[in-house]
Image: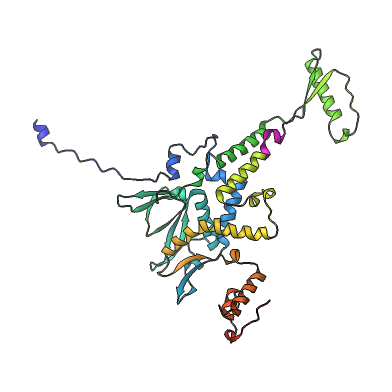
Amino acid sequence: MLRRAFQRPPDPPAPAEQRNYSIADPRVVELFGGNRSLTGVNVSEHNMMGVAAVWRCVHIIAGGIATLPLRAIREHNGITERVPSWLDNPAGGLTRFELIQTTVAHLLLWGNAYLAHVYGGAGQLMGVSPIHPSAVGIDVDDQGRKSYRVSLLNGTTEMFTDATLTHIKGVSTDGICGLSPLQLARNGAFGTALAADQGAANFHGHGPTISAIASFDESTTKDDAKELAAQIDGGLTGPANAGRIGFINRNIQIHPFMVSNEDSQWLESRAFQKSEIATWFGVPDSLVGLSEKQSSWGTGIAEMHKAMASWTFKLWSSPLEDRLSLILPPAVRAEFDYRALLSPAPEAEIGLLIAQVGAGLMSTNEARRVLNLPPIADATTTTPEVPQ
């Protein structure tokens, strides 16, 4: 009793670290072994990029958006003007094209992109550097504030906040983390495509490659059967025996052995997989090698470009514009220039500009600015003739 009375009470247990994860976080799914699809294959970023249709879709969307001019603009007196910013020459060791392409690729595959802020010696923002989504974990406190745990290559962990890291989300159902297409499609298009590739590789690598099966009567010994098979193979097959009359002085039955692509439905299944993957990414079938489904000649190319810009590119570039605008100076926002994709044909555009100048809707110099031409003196008093 005395020992218990004077004994120092034990220290209270340290509070457990609170970590709240989004149910859409792909790392949670992988933690519990959920990265394996129903087909039995493992769906990951590396092996999915080995599927031709996935590579093509990611390359088209990420590369296509990266080719668009990214500029910082500001509206002044109703006129949109371009202002200099770090977007013109981003820091972090990547070019502007590489930065945008990598960021959009992360969005396409993981549904999330993370950009660490790069600061100069005076504390000014110099640019951003992408972080692979698999290295980032999100913690959310009871007030909804997020912090980011980034696993570094040296085995340490560095913490970031919204003030030092920009998180770009794709489609999200909780507002914390974007939904990962890799996980959403692992049991459908992605898993089926990987299983088909493995099945084709196993068939060609381990499957039967003989052309026929020869069966002899029971009186033929094993050694005689091998010798006869060699004589048949040497005397009846090959280009040197084309057109010759074959002679076999034995009771032999030849059974052709062949598994056609139509019987295996490889051609149909491969075309369906390409079409389904293209649907997931919003890419026209003709751009993934299915040109027999739709025409891509003439006006079809221009309309396809407009549809890609409106319903695919902008869906991925708009979140990037909004997030980059938050780390630019006040009243300045980031914007991708889509004029090259959405503008009409040159002859049609010039006709529209002439008509607008003739109607007094814009001056000649304003029209020349649209065409990226320098202004001319006394152009505002000149009214061009509108073609009939």
Residue 97 at x, y percent in the picture: 55, 61
Image location (x, y in percent) of residue 136? 42, 50
Q: What residue span does the magenta drawing correspond to?
A: 257-267
Query: Magenta span has 264?
Result: yes
Q: Is residue 383 left or right of residue 213?
A: left
Quarter of image, res 304: bottom right
Q: Nearer the viewer, residue 352 or 332?
A: 352
Q: Quadrant of the C terminus?
A: bottom right
Q: Is residue 184 above or below residue 233?
A: below
Q: Residue 117 or 197: which is nearer the viewer?
A: 197
**Looking at the image, which residue is at 65% across and 67% down?**
345
Left-right relation of 237 to 12: right
Residue 208, magenta (yes or no): no
Q: Quadrant of the N terminus?
A: top left
Percent position of residue 197, x then y: 62, 39
Q: Which colour scheme is used?
A: rainbow
- Up-down relation of residue 19 to residue 103 (above or below): above
Q: Is residue 227 visible?
A: no
Point out residue 297 in the picture as x, y percentages from the top left corner: 70, 57
Q: Which residue is drawn at 16% across and 38% down?
A: 9
Say above or below: 383 vs 179: below
